[in-house]
Amino acid sequence: MTVLTPQLLESFAASVLPTSQASTLPATCYTDEEFFAFEKEAVFGQEWLCLGRESDVPNPGDFVNVEIIGERLTLVRGQDGAVRVLSPVCQHRGMLVSEGRGNCRAFKCAYHHWTYGLDGGLVGAREMDRTEDFDRSRWGLPSLPVEVWQGFVFTSLRAAPEPLAPRLAKLDELFAHYELGRCVSRKSFESPSMPWNWKIMFENFNDGYHASRLHAGVHDFCPSNRSSFLPYGPDDAAIARTNGFLFPDGGFNALQKALLPIFPGLTQEERSRAAFALVPPTLCLGVAPDQAFYFLIRPKDAGHIEVEVHYLFHPEALRDRLFEERFQLSEAGVNGIVAQDVLATTGVQRGLTSRFAPRGRYSYLEEAQQQFNQWLVRRYTENWPDGGRRTSSASTSTSASTSASASANLGTGVGAGTPALAPISDPTDREVAA
């Protein structure tokens, strides 16, 4: 029996009411594999997906392979300097022509030696001269749409997705003085399997209701009740909030002070707050006065995700002769928050498998969760099997307009929901197909 019933679809209306009236999503949405399979197409198959940063492939021929919802994708920089996203699936017999990361002049399939240029075009296919109607120009690697925003590389599994950048305009304004496009990226953690649903990761990242309690002692300078939310509209691609400090230049560590050089262009207001944004379904992004950080989220199944956590620093910060020492101290502070968040998110996932799992109610400090619900429910509704969009589109539209008027409510505090991940080692997988 399917879980994708009209009744489940109708039940989502309760999750997009104004925050003071709304309920959490049903537990099924976090635990059921059939529902996750639906999300793979209804959400991940429709939206822009963040693969990483332009700086991940700095030189011509550099490539990195990423897997999202079972689809393998290759991020590569061509000889022309352009960043592209290709499918690494050979168009002859389906073997992968690229794995891991490295640098190459071309992608050569090890099976029959079909060879592809860095732009995906087929440049070599031996003994195909007797094959009728074989036009080499029609047999290149599939090339996906690409948008680069603030240094982040996005792609879509759709052939012609709606442009992303206009729907991130409010983030351009929020993050303008951090110059994220110029920032230097540094990977901190990665894990191939963390035991919670991908939505729990997004909810925790944007949940400050817990911060003053779960993270007491390192989060006191940034209390939950000093937050506010940016207005959210139905066409927005991001959900964002800010959280004020009790004093300027706070930091998420035992001293509760920024330890690294401050971003040089910040206003006094920006030095006295943090800001957090979700760009579902794959990117979480936050900024503090001395650093930015981002999570790349890749679901594996209903109850597991792959996570990468990176920091971003202004280029001038790296000139500090004590940068490495200061960074280690700063990261140690974040790791304490990390461990606490892992206990919480793991516990939530386990609890949601219970027959007693609730559809809970929200505090006014959880406006971000209601906005995320709006983002999700619109996509569920538009892609529900058997014309389900006709069932609840009216309730979704009504709640979206209601929430827009309520978005000025105070929101959550900072909860830098970094999972407890294994420190990375230098990459050793340098497989190249050239």
Image (cartoon, rainbow, N blue to C red):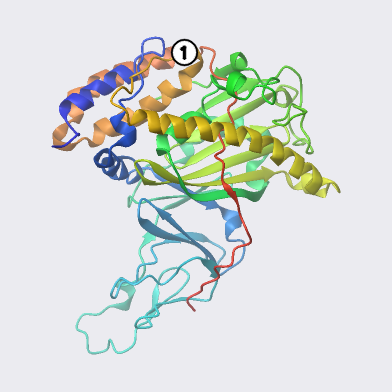
In the shown orientation, is residue 430 left or right of residue 111?
right
Quadrant holding the N terminus? top left
Q: Residue furthest right?
A: 321
**Which residue in the structure is indicated by mark 1?**
363
Expressed as whole percent of the image width and height from the top left, the position of residue 13 reads 28, 19
In the shown orientation, is residue 21 left or right of residue 13?
right
Q: Residue at x 31, y 45 (%)?
A: 40
Badge 1: residue crowd in 10 Å (few <14, some 14–19, many ≥20)? some
Label 1's element?
A: loop
Q: Nearer the viewer, residue 339 or 406?
A: 339
Expressed as whole percent of the image width and height from the top left, the position of residue 5 reads 16, 30
Q: Is residue 240 visible?
A: yes
Quarter holding residue 11: top left
Q: Residue at x 58, y 31 (%)?
A: 340
Image: 219 above or below 55: above
Could you tell me the amino acid type at mark 1? Ser
Image: 363 above or below 208: above
Q: How many marks?
A: 1
Expressed as whole percent of the image width and height from the top left, the position of residue 392 reads 22, 23
Image: 431 above or below 243: below
In the shown orientation, is residue 134 left or right of residue 413?
left
Q: Is residue 235 visible?
A: no
Expressed as whole percent of the image width and height from the top left, the position of residue 191 reads 52, 50
Q: Residue at x 45, y 31 (%)?
A: 347
Q: Residue at x 59, y 63 (%)?
A: 427
Q: Nearer the viewer, residue 11 or 140?
A: 11
In the shown orientation, is residue 201 left or right of residue 157?
right
